[in-house]
Amino acid sequence: MCTSNNTTLMRHVPSKSPDLLLRPVGDGFAYAVNCSYPNSFRLLNQRQQEILQAVNGIDDMQAIAGKLSIPPETLEQFLSMLGRTEIVSFDKFSMPEKPAVPKSLNFWIHTTNACNLGCSYCYISTLNTGKGMAEAVRRQLLHKMVEAAQKDGIRHIRLRLAGGEPLGQFSSWKIFIPQAKQALVAVGCKFDAGFVTNLTMLNDEIIAFAKEYGIGFGVSLDGVKAMHDATRSFRSGCGSFGIVDTNLRRLIAEGISVSINTVVTNLNLTGLPDLTRYLIALDIPFRYSIVKGEKIHAELLDEYLSASYAIMQEAIECGWQFSKRFQFCDLKPNELAFQTCASGFSGGAIYTDGTLKYCHVQFGDDKSQGMSIFNEELSLVDMIASGEHHEDNRSDDCKKCRYRSICTSGCPVYRVDGKDPQCSLYHRYIPKYYELQAIERLRLL
């Protein structure tokens, strides 16, 4: 017989999260995830599904236990487990919230306007004008980073060294990175740096340096062989895939962190299935992003993305780690977030002359607001706070959407009427992402 305390507990009324996604996944299993609570994904058997479906926000636990002929203690244990990630709750549900102040900073660094490739779709309006970032700018950047650690309590700073082609400026950054790491560690701040590169300029010196200082590489890849060569060629017209493929395999063999970013456009979307097979075989993380600022063929995109997901599902059955290897656009299905990227809260983009912009796509745009890191009156944190805040521009639909913490309304700079142009695509593929994650979990069972 229940004690009085247990009787009181059994009178509590559980509710399902309003952002719950509950879908069958085959063989009597289903997945459940609260799309507003980080890492809440769970695989449920048939009996567990019945319990969750019986939670209606009206019946208390005693009534649910009676309806399902389940021991009260078993029901309490199961619902308490679901309550830890707010799939159900006996109170209110939480949402990812913006912290009062940042504890880390993340900057995109435009190391140079020079690039050895001649990609026709490059967004950088200042490409191949001027030189790389001067020594005086790098010194000031280091000064401002140390200031951020001391004045604002920043405990982690990450730089993404991009361009142009940043490896063309390696001789400068191989001096800066050790200096920055030493100076920031001395004031209690962790420092990381990585290259965003076309990976056509790798050599033994770069590899040795990357291993010594834990440098990672984010590599732009448009497709396999002819598909990549058609869009990412040297200015001579010669394709770059063969060199990139060789260098990718060198980094993997050396145990250096490397990931792939593919911008999906009308020019390369038909090659996504072949690219998916290639990247799965390499077993490295990769991300497919939909092109910004131009229209893409929606039907073909859906067709070739679906084919790519089918290839991923086959690979999962053979042991490929889908949840650790694939990202779609800026979606954050497990971690969740209060905004898409660091810009406007804990990050931004710094141009070769030291101008701090909200985003790197604004380089060369005089209409967008910018500040200089040579301003001694404002710290980096102050500059970010007093700068542009496109991230706050969200539609009413986005604010109410079940997936608002997963897609975060997409890239703030390219939103249309406050939402990502690929909104409808996300609504189809977010459940599919969780389905593949469930298949991955089922295989482990």
Image (spheres, grey):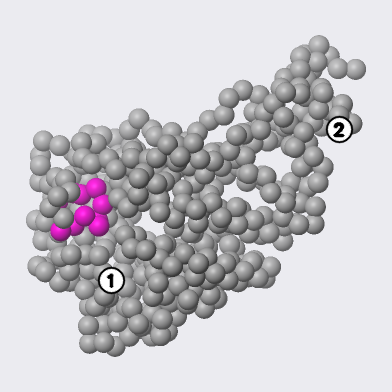
Specify the label residue 121 is tagged with. Answer: 1
Judge left or right: residue 280 versus residue 294: right
Q: Nearer the viewer, mark 2 or mark 1?
A: 1
Does residue 372 appear in the picture of this structure?
A: yes
Q: Which residues are magenta?
A: 354-364
Q: Quadrant of the C terminus?
A: bottom right
Residue ID at (42%, 62%): 289
Q: Look at mark 2 in the image and give the residue it sits on.
A: 68
Element under label 2?
helix
Percent of width and height locating residue 260:
42, 68
> Toward which corner of the image does residue 165 lie, by quadrant?
bottom left
Residue ID at (45%, 40%): 397
Judge left or right: residue 28 versus residue 410: right
Q: Amino acid at mark 2?
A: Leu
Percent of width and height locating residue 335:
50, 46
Whichever of callouts 2 and 1 sits on the residue coming sooner in the sequence is 2
